[in-house]
Amino acid sequence: MNDPISVSMVCMLAGKITLESGAETHRVEDTMNRIASAFGLEDAQSYATPTGINFSSGPAESTNFIRISNRSTDLHKIANVNDISRKITAGEVDLPGALKLLKEVDRAKLTFPGWMQIISAAFVSGSFAFMFGGTWLNYLPAFFIGGLGFAALIGCDRFINTRFISEFLASILIGLLAFISIYCGWGSDLNKIIIGAVMPLVPGLHITNAVRDLMAGHLIAGLSKGVEAFLTAFAIGAGVAVVIGII
C-alpha cells in the first residue's frame, strides 16, 4: 500500500505543473484523479481553479492546497506530465520514480528561449497582416513591429508582476511604431499592421480553455479564465486606443 502523503505529493505536483503550463482545470483534475487511483486512492478528491489546487486522499482526510501564482503556456510540459500519468496508470512507474520524473519536468525551463519566441511572434504578426488582406508592404512592418512588441512584453514581464500592464505597454509600443511606419512611408495600411502585430498578444489559449472548462461544467474556472481573457483583450485594445487618441 502506497503512503497517502507521498501519493498526494505526486498528484499535487502533477496538477501544479499542468495548471502552470496552461492546461484546462478539468484536465488537471482528471490527471490527478487518475494518478491517485493508480496508486490505490480510489476516493481521492481534487479541485482546481486557475489560481489554486485542492487535493484530498479521501473524503474524511485532510485537504492539501497549492496556490498557483504564475501561469504560462508550455504544451511540452503538459505532454510530459500526461506521458508520466499514462506510465503510472500502466504500472510502468512506481511512486518514487513518478515523483522523480515530475520534479525533473517541474525544474525544466521553457522549451523555447526568448529570442526564438520573439522571432516566431514576428512571423505570426507578418502572416496575420497578410492573411487579413494586407500586402507585402504591410507584411514587413507587421513582422518587425510584432516582434518588437512581443520583446517588449517579455521585457516588461521581468520587472512588472501584473501581466495586464505588460500587455498594455506592449500594445502602446506597437501602436506607436505602426504610426511611425506609416508616417515614414514604410507601410500602406495602418489597420492591417496593427492587427497583425497584436495577434501574438491575443489570449487565444485563455479563450479556448475558458470555453472548454465551461462546456465541462467547471463554471468558476471557465468564468475566471473568460474574465482573464477579457482583461487581456481590454489591455491590448486600450494600449492601441491610447496611441490613436494622442496622435
Image (spheres, helix red, strand yellow):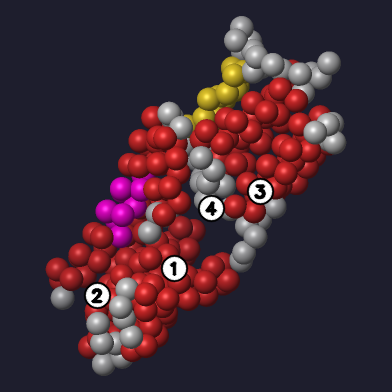
Number of residues whose C-alpha sits closer than 10 Å to that of mark 1, classed few (under 14), some (14–19) or many (20 or more): many
Apparent side of residue 216 relative to residue 101 in the rendered image (left or right)? left
Q: Quadrant of the C terminus?
A: bottom left
Mark earlier in primary sequence (1, 3): 3
Q: Which element carries disc 3, helix, strand or loop?
A: helix
Q: Which element carries disc 1, helix, strand or loop?
A: helix
The answer to whether residue 229 is magenta is yes
Residue 6 visible in this rendered orientation of the protein: no
Q: Which residues are magenta?
A: 228-236
In this rendering, which labeled residue sits more in front, label 1 or label 2?
A: 2
Amino acid at circle 4: Thr
Amino acid at circle 2: Asn
4 up-or-down from 204: above or below: above
Q: Residue at x 76, y 18 (%)?
A: 40
In this rendering, which labeled residue sits more in front, label 4 or label 2?
A: 2
Apparent side of residue 173 relative to residue 56 in the rendered image (left or right)? left
| Residue hosting label 3 | 79
Residue 87 rendering spot, x and y as whole percentages: 78, 38
Mark earlier in primary sequence (1, 4): 4
Nearest the viewer among 65 and 143 is: 143
| Residue hosting label 2 | 191
